[in-house]
Image (cartoon, rainbow, N blue to C red):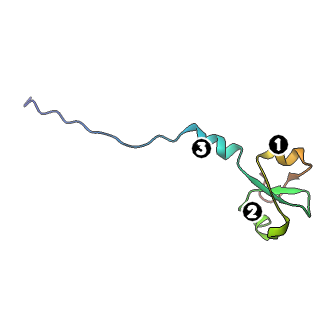
Amino acid sequence: MNGNTNTTTNNVEKPSNTNVVNKIESTYVGSDKSNKYHYPDCRWAKKIKPENLLEFNGKSDAEGKGYVPCGTCNP
């Protein structure tokens, strides 16, 4: 051995558990003109007029207000 030590520093950040929680209880959207809630990127959610758009802070929030999951995006 020549006394040189090879050290490698790995500065890769590990994903936090916060990302998992946000994915599970993310924001859902619905319309005050229907009883369905959607993922925001659902094709039906994109058709909701801004004046009718509602946001929910999770499935329990949407379902507690009488909304049911969209059959297309299956939130």
Left/right placement of residue 71 relative to residue 7 reads: right
Q: In the image, what residue type sits under mark 2?
A: Cys
Residue tagged 3: 19
**Corner quadrant of residue 52:** bottom right
Left/right placement of residue 6 relative to residue 64 reads: left
Q: In the image, what residue type sits under mark 1?
A: Ser
Residue nearer the viewer, 19 or 55: 55
Q: Around disc 1, counting alpha carbons within 10 Å, would you say few (fewer than 14), some (14 to 19), or many (20 or more)?
A: few
Q: How far apart are marks 1 and 3 (CA)?
A: 19 Å
Q: Residue at x 72, y 44 (%)?
A: 25
Residue 63: image location, x then y, percent: 87, 46
Q: In the image, what residue type sits under mark 3?
A: Asn
Q: Earlier in the sequence, mark 1 or mark 2?
A: 2
Q: Which residue is drawn at 92% across and 64% down?
A: 33
Which of the image's four quarters has the N terminus? top left
Q: How far apart are marks 1 and 2 (CA)?
A: 19 Å
Q: Residue at x 40, y 43 (%)?
A: 12
Residue nearer the viewer, 11 or 50: 50
Query: Can you see residue 48?
Result: no
Q: Residue furthest left?
A: 2
Element assignment for label 3: helix
Residue tagged 2: 42
Q: Distance between the residues labelled 3 and 2?
A: 21 Å
Q: Which of marks 1 and 3 is nearer the N terminus?
A: 3
Residue tagged 1: 60
**Corner quadrant of residue 29:** bottom right
